[in-house]
Image (tube, rainbow, N blue to C red):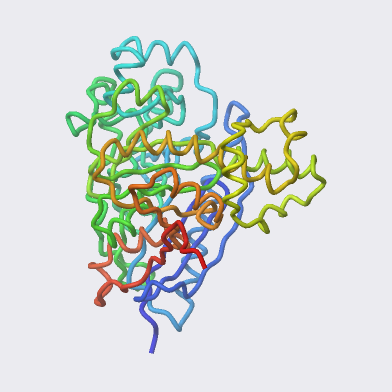
Amino acid sequence: MSIPVIAIFDIGKTNKKVFLFDEYYQIRFEKSIQLAEIKDEDGFPCEDIHSLTRWIKDSFKELLSLSEYKINAINISAHGASFVHLDESGNPVAPLYNYLKPYPDELKKKFYNTYGGENEFSRITASPVLGNLNSGMQLYWLKQEHPEIFKRIKYSLHLPEYISYLFSGKPASGITSIGCHTNLWDFKENNYHQWVSQEGILEKLAPIHPSNEVVQANLKGHEILSGIGLHDSSAALIPYLKYFTGPFVLLSTGTWSISLNPFNHSPLTSEELEKDCLCYLTYQGKPVKASRQFAGHEHDQGVNLLSQYFNKSKKYYQTICYDDAAIQKLKLNQTDLHNEALTSLGSFEEAYHLLVMTLVEKQKAKTGLVIQDASVKNIFVDGGFSQNKIYMNLLAQAFPKTKVNAASLPQASSLGAALVIHEKWNPLPLPQHLIQTIQYPLPSV
């Protein structure tokens, strides 16, 4: 008898993955690929939408050939700030422009001068001024500088919803994509910002559909439920929303450490914007206050410095245990980590404690921006720093009135995309212990 599964495509900027989860949300199949970039008409690197489309279709054909599994549903988690522009026939009419591509300064000035200025517009749309990373600005640029392409567009779909469209044939806009620093959404009015209709952009956007909606699709003779897709940051929050009633903050750590508070619905202030705060929208359309720190990058840079100075391997830090005495000594000396300070630090171990202590002090300030009040009872840390006991102990000390937990949840965004349509495809109740947590500080032995 075939095992019932859900297929999830998880499309990152670098790695493209596909998974099969069974009804207990255990991974039954996975594979990944990195696709070569191409260049757009200006010579700037971008993803090859045609190559990506072929890989998705070929991978799904492979999944259907696995006789031991019965695919009941499919959903997508993918990075945001990327539009796929389709003509009347559903074919791309432009490259999948890179959100890192520089935005023309004069066009940016024209836009913000027309619509209230950078500070006020950013506050209303919860979108820091980020150029092409504000995906709505890509459509404004096309209209202004490539009107021949703009006229051919029937629908502009964010990447998660485009991939869903490949399976469902139904063009849709999802709130998790729209609400992520796109410049499109007015968070006060809970609707598109007025500029979207004034510039003729609204007619290029597909109707908004709930993020937990499914469409019955017939795919090569198989009846399969297709979700509409999710922005990966919002998808990664879903397992925590499903399992914890809150209030809590999720600290998602990697190259960037992003603090997400789905229980802070206060409007974004100008001061918060200046400190690099922004808002996401959950799959339920509720605002999520967020702040970010370049912590993973700073950590790697610091480890490189220490490894060279003390002549240790770059993985040596992984062998170091938390040392409270070293922390107390560093607090008394109040030393900052820089080349000159290394001469006063006796060992790699001591210097590494100082590096992490510095990162946690910055993280306390950043996470504090989204906590705001005493109602938050838990901080869940996932990603790389959740495995770092020095970091976790120091973070627990930084938030003594809050439970600080290391969370273990592999493939959180893929799992979120599966869980958001759980009731539609899975007859079983949610597994009880899907998320494993360890509370810090650890009890002394």
Q: Nearer the viewer, residue 196 or 61?
A: 196
Rendered residue at 60%/37% (across/down)? 298
Where residue 425 sits, quadrant-wise, is bottom left
The number of discs equals 0
Q: Is residue 173 visible to the viewer in this orientation of the structure?
A: no
Image quarter in which the N terminus is found? bottom left
Rendered residue at 41%/52% (across/down)? 163
Q: Nearer the viewer, residue 281 or 404?
A: 404
Residue at far left of view: 189
Q: Nearer the viewer, residue 250 or 161?
A: 250
Q: Is residue 135 visible to the viewer in this orientation of the structure?
A: yes
Q: Nearer the viewer, residue 121 or 400?
A: 400
173 up-or-down from 246: above or below: above
Task: Residue 156 in the image: state x and y as whole percent.
Answer: 36, 38
75 up-or-down from 346: above or below: below
Where residue 301 sits, quadrant-wise, is top right
Rendered residue at 38%/46% (across/down)? 90
Query: Does 120 sit left or right of 109 as displayed?
Result: left
Task: Residue 259 in the image: state x and y as whole percent.
Answer: 40, 42
Query: Does 109 sit left or right of 192 as displayed?
Result: right
Task: Residue 105 in the image: state x and y as whole percent.
Answer: 49, 14
Query: Does 387 sit left or right of 368 as displayed?
Result: right
Residue at far right of view: 311
Where residue 338 sits, quadrant-wise, is top right
Rendered residue at 31%/73% (across/down)? 432
Query: Does 378 sit left or right of 411 as displayed?
Result: left
206 up-or-down from 116: above or below: below
Task: Residue 52 in the image: state x and y as whole percent.
Answer: 53, 51
